[in-house]
Image: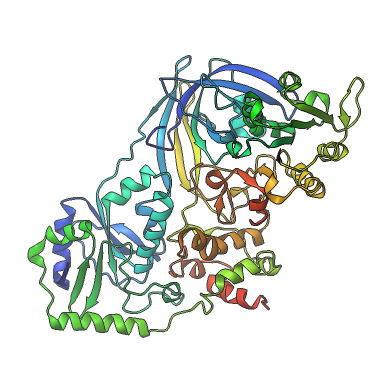
């Protein structure tokens, strides 16, 4: 990493995939660092993406740490910077600085069963964890993935999720019935509730819209999961990424440094300002 | 290093320092005390109350360019000028509250990732403090926060005004340099000087100040009242102007934005500017969700950051009792009153 933490590395977009169409479109970008730059990351960490002339946005790194020839970001079109990056083409150059934040303690979960529960673009931050778990399949017990989108067109990583089957139990859902849909119809927390999970020796990792996370945690607690068996990530507006600009704090914690990964046991000690 | 300086020689000292860089001191400009560049030969009376804007701007300017970018069609972006260029400067007349605030700013900008822009300025700017022989503002409350009218924390030199002369105490290498550069102007302090300094400092402490009466328990009181409806009441008059934080010597929040200067090729600057936790869009997500969506939550953030979160993270308050946020609030929001109210949990 550059000595000046504010100075991004340059990275070229080498691949773009449209995951979800529409007003809240999601695209996956693969970027390669230029000029011999680069950094290693851990699952759960984020990077500050620059579109020069527009600004910066904090985005979770969606590629597995073992992949070294590119970094992957799945980005929803939402504000000024994310809209600008959605308009970019393969070959265009962005800035990337990081990695920022803490990580999922995957190494501590050896021998445990893992349940991933996510919705919308919340699959991206936990995707490196799923990839790491599947790549080291024998280190873990059962692996279960719940994922839901509003409609079948809102399912991101659809092909990758299909490939997971075999290594993991995959349960997809959409909010309301559609012709030809064979998965669950209803919200993600309800899908989880319809297939009760045994909390013994199990870690649950959830990421998605705040309202989904809230109900998922309620349901997991009802199933008997302890507070330290539940992990989630939180997001807040960020500008610096290094604990100085002062806006992403939840109580005493700057999410960019102390987060974004929290166990529910840790998170419930913080004020609800996220 | 301690010395005395006759008042009539202050001008010569400043002239000697101006050979090495700019010298700033408070001047009454239009209707306010502001740190102003001292013109060659100008008199510096050091008879100011406290500057409206704090000294933090010398190490953390309101606007600064982090780097410039240039994108020629089809070529990789060029990023230039990422090294902060800083002229050496000496700032006179810094009140001890602003000095202690610098210790807080050092914590923020130096902990974890170091901030090269702040650090470059901090290394080159020398702060010469002026002890407050009497409180410069009716809203001073430095003593409540463990400070004092003659605290040396964060300063390179502390000057104390005595009869016809100043007592000078240089506590850092940068500070000692200032004295060494014009050694002939100074005298070694004698027993009478030392006695007069002790007296001046003792008298300064006897002046009444405002006080947070519950400083030991305010941390617990703020935790207890986090979800209290009190915050909405206290913030009811707030118009969200943000004067409190812009004028605060230890508020450090900033924004980073791109300012485009040319379209083809695309050129511009990535700029850091002071930002403000009292503004709604400070924390608003691009989705429209806002974790601190009303003035009550934003006032609570300002007070809790200063008197709770910073204490939890750094074992010191992020407030040094200068009173600017009280004096300049257009609607009378008052951190001393709020801290005192928290203990009781009620406010009429």
Q: Is residue B135 left or right of residue A73?
A: left
Q: Nearer the viewer, residue B295 or A175?
A: A175
Q: Percent position (x, y) of residue B288? A: 70, 43
Q: Is residue A235 left or right of residue B98?
A: right
Residue B333 in sight from this viewpoint: no
Q: Percent position (x, y) of residue A210? A: 73, 44
Residue lying at the far left of the rendered structure: B184
Q: Quadrant of the N terminus of chain A?
A: top left
Q: Percent position (x, y) of residue A182? A: 89, 23
Going 56% across and 56% down the picture, which residue do you hit?
A: A252
Q: Percent position (x, y) of residue A81? A: 59, 32
Q: Nearer the viewer, residue B333 or A150?
A: A150
Q: Is residue A31 left or right of residue B178?
A: right
Q: Nearer the viewer, residue B33 or A44?
A: A44
Going 33% across and 60% down the picture, which residue do you hit?
A: B35
According to the image, what is the colour scheme of the structure? rainbow
Going 37% across and 47% down the picture, which residue do you hit?
A: B118
Count of numbered labels shown in the rendering = 0
Going 52% across and 66% down the picture, which residue do you hit?
A: B307
Q: Is residue A119 left or right of residue B250?
A: right
Q: Give above or below for A242 relative to A82.
A: below
Residue A130 in sight from this viewpoint: yes
Q: Give above or below for B109 relative to A138.
A: below
Residue B231 in which image quadrant: bottom right
């Amino acid at each position: 990493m550059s000595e000046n933490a504010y100075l991004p590395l340059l990275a070229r977009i080498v691949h773009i995939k449209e995951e979800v169409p529409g007003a809240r479109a999601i695209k996956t970008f693969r970027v390669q660092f230029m000029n011999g730059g680069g950094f290693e990351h851990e699952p759960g960490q984020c990077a500050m993406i620059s579109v020069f002339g527009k600004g910066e946005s904090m985005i979770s790194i969606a590629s597995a740490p073992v992949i070294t020839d590119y970094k992957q970001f799945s980005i929803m079109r939402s504000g000024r910077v994310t809209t600008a990056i959605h308009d970019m083409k393969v070959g265009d150059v962005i800035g990337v600085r990081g990695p920022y934040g803490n990580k999922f303690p995957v190494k501590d979960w050896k021998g445990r069963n893992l349940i991933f529960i996510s919705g919308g673009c919340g699959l991206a931050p936990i995707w490196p964890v799923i990839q790491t778990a599947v790549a080291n399949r024998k280190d873990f017990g059962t692996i279960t993935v719940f994922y839901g989108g509003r409609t079948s067109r809102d399912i991101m990583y659809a092909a990758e999720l299909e490939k997971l089957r075999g290594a993991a139990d995959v349960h997809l859902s959409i909010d309301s019935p559609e012709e030809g849909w064979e998965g669950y119809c209803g919200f993600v927390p309800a899908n989880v509730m319809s297939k009760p999970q045994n909390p013994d020796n199990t870690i649950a990792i959830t990421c998605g819209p705040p309202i989904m996370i809230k109900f998922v945690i309620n349901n997991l607690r009802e199933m008997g999961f302890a507070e330290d068996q539940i992990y989630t990530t939180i997001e807040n507006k960020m500008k610096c990424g290094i604990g100085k600009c002062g806006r992403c704090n939840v109580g005493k914690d700057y999410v960019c440094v102390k987060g974004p990964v929290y166990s529910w046991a840790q998170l419930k000690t913080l004020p609800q300002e996220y | 290093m301690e010395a005395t300086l006759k008042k009539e020689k202050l001008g010569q000292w400043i002239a000697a320092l101006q050979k090495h860089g700019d010298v700033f001191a408070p001047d009454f400009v239009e209707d306010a005390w502001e740190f102003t560049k001292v013109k060659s030969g100008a008199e510096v009376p050091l008879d100011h109350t406290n500057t409206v804007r704090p000294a933090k701007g010398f190490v953390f300017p309101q606007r600064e360019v982090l780097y410039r970018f240039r994108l020629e069609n089809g070529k990789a972006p060029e990023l230039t000028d990422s090294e902060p260029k800083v002229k050496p400067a000496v700032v006179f007349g810094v009140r001890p509250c602003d000095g202690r605030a610098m210790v807080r700013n050092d914590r923020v900008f130096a902990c974890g990732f170091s901030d090269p822009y702040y650090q470059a300025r901090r290394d080159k700017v020398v702060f010469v403090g002026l002890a407050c022989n009497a409180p410069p503002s009716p809203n001073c409350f430095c003593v409540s926060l463990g400070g004092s009218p003659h605290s040396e924390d964060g300063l390179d030199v502390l000057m104390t005004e005595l009869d016809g002369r100043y007592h000078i105490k240089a506590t850092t290498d940068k500070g000692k340099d200032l004295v060494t550069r014009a050694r002939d102007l100074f005298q070694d302090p004698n027993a009478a000087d030392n006695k007069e300094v002790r007296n001046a400092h003792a008298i300064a402490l006897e002046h009444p100040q405002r006080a947070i009466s519950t400083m030991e328990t305010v941390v617990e009181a703020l935790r207890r009242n986090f979800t209290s409806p009190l915050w909405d009441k206290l913030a009811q008059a707030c118009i969200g102007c943000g004067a409190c934080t812009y004028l605060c010597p230890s508020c450090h929040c900033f924004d980073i934005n791109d300012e485009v200067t040319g379209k083809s090729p695309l050129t511009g600057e990535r700029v850091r500017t002071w930002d403000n936790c009292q503004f709604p869009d400070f924390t608003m997500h691009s989705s429209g969700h806002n974790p601190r969506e009303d003035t009550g939550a934003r006032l609570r953030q300002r007070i809790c950051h200063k008197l709770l979160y910073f204490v939890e993270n750094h074992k010191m308050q992020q407030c040094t009792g200068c009173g600017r946020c009280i004096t300049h609030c257009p609607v009378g929001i008052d951190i001393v009153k709020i801290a005192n109210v928290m203990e009781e949990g009620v406010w009429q």
